[in-house]
Amino acid sequence: MLFCNNEKPLKPSVSAHYLLPIIMEKTMAAFPEVKKTVQYEGPESKNPLAYRFYNPDEKIEGKAMKDHFRFSAAFWHTMRASGSDPFGPGTMYRPWEGKDTVANAQKRVRVFFEFLEKMQLNFYCFHDRDVAPEGKTLAETNGNLDEVVKVFKEEQHRTGIKLLWGTANLFGNPRYMHGAATSSNADAFAFAAAQVKKALEVTKELGGDGYTFWGGREGYQCIWNTDMKRELDHLAKFMHLAVDYAKQIGFKGQFYFEPKPKEPTKHQYDFDSAACINFLRAYGLEKYVKMNIETNHATLAGHSVEHELEYAGHQGFLGSVDANAGDELLGWDTDQFPTNVYMTTKMMLSILKYGGLGKGGLNFDAKVRRESFEPIDLFYAHIGGMDAFALGLKIAADIRKGGELAKMVQDRYSSWDSGIGKEIEAGKQDFKSLEKYILKKGDTEPNVSGRQELFENIVNRYVFK
Ligand code: XLS
Ligand code: NI
Ligand code: NI
């Protein structure tokens, strides 16, 4: 995720609808081209503002699609991404934007809910600093946040849309230059603690289903100046303090830890699922925190998202998903919208296998490209992502129903179902007895081919029906 709260969107001087006032009146539609809610119209539809596969109430494996996904939009990307990159300023045209005031922040929330409603998105996520401007002091900042939270509450009440998870931005402000919980500056830790305290209160106030820790700048650039053990101890201390405070205030949401291997620091401590789970177990946090897996972070770690889901899933840590995609040729967190149906199929196979996301969901931690500067592009982007997942879910459910892949995997491991394999799994063999077994047998025998190509062909049969 790359964004800067203070950057103002540009105002291109083209075509008539750009002549809308900069600050919109509450009653004025922010997305006038989208006259009605985006609806399911089926695979044959050519309407760019319709779903071809996402049919919210359609049951797949006995559960409505909307409950499988719990789709969420990210406030930061949807409402605050300006389109800036390291080479140039923002490009986005957002007619509702104005001064960085509380009043405008409140209007922005109403626009956001208009978007969520028109998209049939049932959830959203936010960082504290995306939604309300920072004041001169923490007290002033918290006051600003409270004013905006009132509008979130009203809009949630009006629409029934819910908060999937909240989080705190512990990376944007220069005070976090060395990190927040892992900062060399104890005051930065203290400020971050105060910030998360408030973010938890607000998340609870909004009935949020979860709270996410993404490491932000929790990592390091240079081993010479870094006390890694101390930094990791502090990160664990920070999470324990958050868990304790959640208990104190009665926040029942699920905590998530979101892995990301690098960016902004060279070595982020929350590298991947395996590293995060090791950290959680080493510091006694495993009962309280699950994983929030993000596709583009998985690929930055040299993994695929299905690897990350599978790893978290079999360890019992599968929590939620930040749905996006990277670019094959760019080595950074491009946060694109996911459209690759092979990928969504693999993801849904893992998610179904581990019994679904529970309190989690699929949060589009994704932003439109810098060149896609019109508000309507936000619709096309989310429609594409939701349809890719809906189709992926249908294919995954078909694959599971067909059963060939599961059967072939089972056959591949059949040497473990009887004889020596079964005895090893049952703990009835040791090194001495295994040596005896092999000395007697002479050597191993090839048993079942890996059949990767056949697996791939079968998958294609389901994908291209
Ligand atoms: C950044 C992360 C961030 C988290 C929430 O790369 O994806 O957006 O999801 O802080
Ligand atoms: Ni990201
Ligand atoms: Ni994310």
Image (cartoon, grey):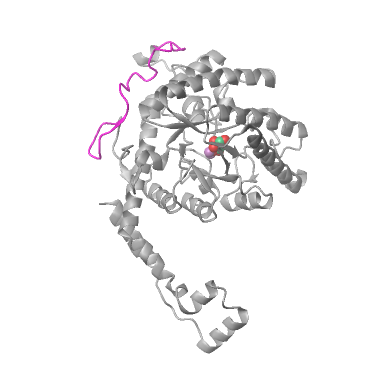
- Horizontal side of 11 relative to 232 (left or right) equals left
For the question of whether residue 73 can be seen, the reply is yes
The answer to whether 25 is drawn above or below residue 293 in the figure is above
* Residue 374 appears in the figure: no
Q: Nearer the viewer, residue 187 or 300?
A: 187
Quadrant of res 36: top left
Q: Quadrant of the N terminus?
A: top right
Q: Residue 2, relative to residue 9: is it above or below?
A: below
Extreme residue toward the left, this view = 44
**Could you tell me residue 285's position as x and y percent?**
65, 47
Reply yes or no: does residue 37 show up in magenta: yes
Instruction: Tell me the quarter of the picture where residue 145 sits.
Output: top right
**Which one is in front, 155 or 77?**
155
In terms of depth relative to the viewer, which is nearer, 264 or 130? 130
Q: Position of residue 205 (x, y in %)?
A: 56, 27
Q: Residue at x 31, y 56 (%)?
A: 401
Whether the magenta-drawn stretch holds residue 425 is answered as: no
Position above or below: 131 against 388: above
Main secondary structure along the magenta-highlighted residues: loop
| Range of magenta residues | 20-48
* x and y, in percent, of residue 102 in the image: 56, 15
Lateral position of residue 253 relative to residue 323, left or right: right
Q: How many marks?
A: 0
User: Measuring 61% from the left and 34% from the top, which residue is drawn there?
Assistant: 250
- Residue 94, given in percent of the width and then of the height, sits at 45, 20
The furthest residue to the bottom? 440
